[in-house]
Amino acid sequence: MIITILSGGVGGARFARGVREHLRRSLPDAELRIIVNTGDDMWLAGLRITPDLDSVMYTLARANDEERGWGRIGETERASAELNAYGVGWPWFTLGDLDLGTHIARSSFLRDGQTLSQATARITSRWDLGALLIPVTDSEVETHVTVEGGELHFQEWWTRHRARLPALGFVQRGIEGAVATDAALAAIRDADVVLVAPSNPVVSIGTILGIPGIRDALAATAAPIVGVSPIIGGAIVRGMADACLTAIGVETTAPAVAAHYGARSAGGLLDAWLVDTVDASASYDVPTTAVPLWMRDLDTSAQLASDALAAARL
């Protein structure tokens, strides 16, 4: 059995960890493939930074900082302090020393002529991830946010301004000419189940869906596609996805996000939709199952994964 996840960063990483745990407990022969958003990527201080790929990798490797929610556990930041002293990089976007090792390795591989997929395969090979991490594209596609007066890279809007500047829209620079990786297309084509993680619907899952070829592959796959709501009781689970949803005119509710994705039977994305029990009484355009969505620990995360796979049989 092949389970494929469409994932963004922290929320997607935690969901992927739960899916891996469920598979290890109940379906040890299953294969887990994770297609990861690359729209948050950027060049900074001469290095290629891939926040979502790294969040998923560190989480599955048990090397992530759970308290901060990002980066490596036990980090120091001496190198970033030196870069700031030289006026290099963004002082509000701190890269830990261990994290810098990952970025330096990736950038070295890319400058040697390897693709992002090849570089990712080399970087992830040092860890026992129990999953295959797949960049959705090897093309450089970077999300920018349109605000009054111009555009900001998504990371500046998100990290520096904490999404407080009203967003007028989102632009994925380079997406028209981007090419989905062969591995991403194969992961969708060969899947027995496709799971849409509770990641940001606009800049994470939305960017994945915007890569040419991905929507067609999802429409054609024989696998059921099950989405997990990132909204519980009208509030975001993590991050500032509400600011992104507001910018595109979507309410921060589980039914609104379901309608945003749409039912595959009507030309949309989803065959099934998981919402929290507090949202059970709402009306949905997609076949919906209500289960506890809070991933409080490994057991509750694994149970959510089990519920998502069960929903695939609807």
Image (tube, grey):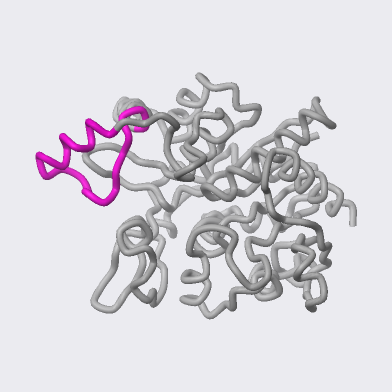
Q: Is residue 230 visible?
A: yes
Residue 6 in the figure: left or right of residue 91: right
x, y percent for residue 207: 51, 58
Residue 257: x %, y % from top left: 65, 70
Segment colored magenta: 77-99
What is the tally of numbered marks visible in this picture? Answer: 0
Is 82 part of what is drawn in magenta?
yes
Residue name at image x 74 percent, y 45 percent: 300
Q: Residue at x 39, y 28 (%)?
A: 114
Q: Considering the image in quadrants, where does the N terminus appear?
A: top right
Image location (x, y in percent) of residue 119: 43, 29
Tell me which residue sits at (80%, 61%) in the image.
272
Direction from residue 309 to residue 243 in the image, left or right: left
Q: Quadrant of the C terminus?
A: bottom right
Magenta-span inclusion, residue 143: no
Q: Is residue 30 left or right of residue 199?
A: right
Q: In this picture, is 148 found above or below 128?
A: below
Q: State the image quarter where residue 146 is shown.
A: bottom left
In this rendering, is residue 91 above or below 22? Answer: below
- Residue 34's x, y, as percent? 62, 40
Which residue is at the front of the view, 284 or 172? 284
Instruction: Say if residue 212 shows up in the picture.
Output: no
Q: Nearer the viewer, residue 257 or 35?
A: 257
202, above or below 248, in the image:
above
* Location of residue 145 by image quarter: bottom left
Residue 161 image-quadrant placement: bottom left
